[in-house]
Image: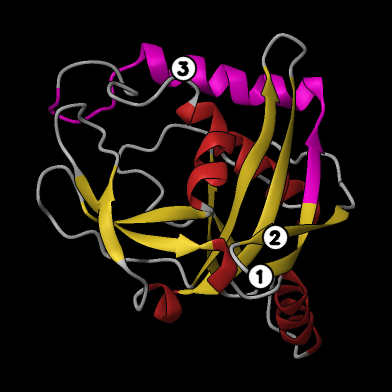
Amino acid sequence: MITPSFARPKIILKQFDDVIRECWSVSIPPDEYSVCENEEWYCNTRKNGSNRSGTYAKGFRPGAIRTGCLGELAFAKLLKLPVDFGYKNKGDGGVDFRLYGVGLDVKVSYCDTYERDHCNRVQVINDRGKRVISKADFYVSGYVEYDDPDNRQAEVIFTGWISRNQLEKANVNQGLSISVDKKTLCYKIQFSDLCDLSNMVEFFSDRMKRGVPR
């Protein structure tokens, strides 16, 4: 578990479909990038602890593990939160962070996925045909603007957030699978449908003022 250095986001405007949204840009420096790189190496060279054969990241697109770690790390930098990339036998339960009694899941996509679809996806039916229960209260959405492994630098753009109730009203369609020969079903989170990040700040500020434990 590490607590990355605090980062004040750069505020930028991005257009998604017909909506212009205020987004937050967070840069990842080389020393913290290396943490994500090391996690990707670990996941690609260890078994996942289940009964499946193969490596932990079998079937993932190259860089997928690193992309997820970069998103979590960037969010942790914004709120001065510790981030735990340690291996968990049953995963993280769909919750990356808990803050003021609320579970948060950070979802980031590749830049090319963002440019094509302007969305993220949250799994509904996994590659074994089983329903995935949403356990997070809110989902923070974004994408990796650039990822430079040679210089160990990256930039993550956060586009908004959405509640679990809102998520479950989203369209469901096919997504990528852990197994390369299978498909999953996923909620499709359009960036244009997200709530503003400023509302997230107000939400947590209110809980802090009311004395909710962090």
Q: Sequence order check: which comes first, mark 3 or mark 1?
A: 1
Q: CA distance from mark 2 to mark 3?
A: 36 Å
Q: Against 181, is 124 above or below?
A: below
Residue bearing mark 2:
15
* Quadrant of the rendering where the N terminus is positioned: top right
Q: Percent position (x, y) of residue 190?
A: 49, 63
Q: Percent position (x, y) of residue 144?
A: 64, 38
* Quadrant of the rendering where the C terminus is positioned: bottom right
Q: Sequence order check: which comes first, mark 2 or mark 3?
A: 2
Which stretch did the figure color magenta?
A: 25-52
Q: Against 194, is 70 above or below?
A: above
Residue bearing mark 3:
42
Tags 2 and 1 touching, CB below 8 Å: yes
Q: Is residue 7 left or right of residue 111?
A: right
At label 1, which amino acid type do we have?
A: Val
Residue bearing mark 1:
19
Q: Against 213, is 106 above or below?
A: above
